[in-house]
Image (cartoon, rainbow, N blue to C red):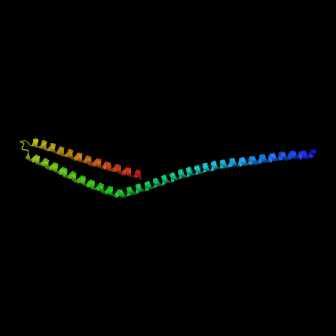
Amino acid sequence: MSRNEMHRKTHRKKRKWLLGAAVLIVFFGSSLNVVFADQNIQSLLTNWFDQKKTESIGEIEEAVDAEQQKQTQRLQEALRPEIEKLNEQLNAFTDQEKAKSIQAIQGHADQLIANIELDGTEEKENVAAEFKQIIQEAKDKMDHVRATLETNEEASETEQPENE
């Protein structure tokens, strides 16, 4: 064999080895890429589902909050006339009870004054003054109850706009 032929055989063997090595590298490399692609797809899908889940939860919370605000507003608007009506009824009832109580106290005091048999008018005047003072104290206490009631009404009216 000539030197050229030997050289060709050697080169052919080297080429076959290089070609075989290249085929093996491509084969194993593509297998690894498939494994990596599977892992990438899985992580992509997991990330996508997590992102969609978070977005969905946020949208649901926003929708629930918005609806809660609407319904709270609607409820307050529906109750406002009823509350005003009840306040008016309570004020009328308080006025009636106050008038009844004052009338009863004054009648009782007048009856006691009329039934007193004292010698001096000065003593009668002292007793009458005490009864008037008692009546005035009773009126003041009733007025205090009324003022407390009105203060509570005003406080509840100022709290309602804050909730809206």
| Residue depicted at 19% across the width and 50% down the height | 101
Q: Residue at x 67, y 49 (%)?
A: 34
Q: Position of residue 71 (x, y in %)?
A: 41, 56
Looking at this view, name the residue that lies furthest to the right.
Answer: 2
Q: Quadrant of residue 131?
A: top left
Q: Residue at x 65, y 49 (%)?
A: 37
Q: In the image shown, does 8 or 83 lie closer to the viewer?
A: 8
Residue 39 located left or right of residue 5: left
The mark total stands at: 0
- Relative placement, left or right, of 2 versus 84 is right
| Along the viewing direction, whichever of 125 and 127 lies nearer the viewer | 127
Q: Quick one: which residue is furthest to the front in this view?
A: 1
- For the residue pair 153 and 110, the one nearer the viewer reads as 153
Foreground: 96 or 164? Answer: 164
Residue 57 location, x and y as percent?
51, 51
Quadrant that contains the N terminus: top right
Q: For the point 27% across and 49% down, which residue is it?
A: 146
- Residue 91 % position (x, y): 27, 53
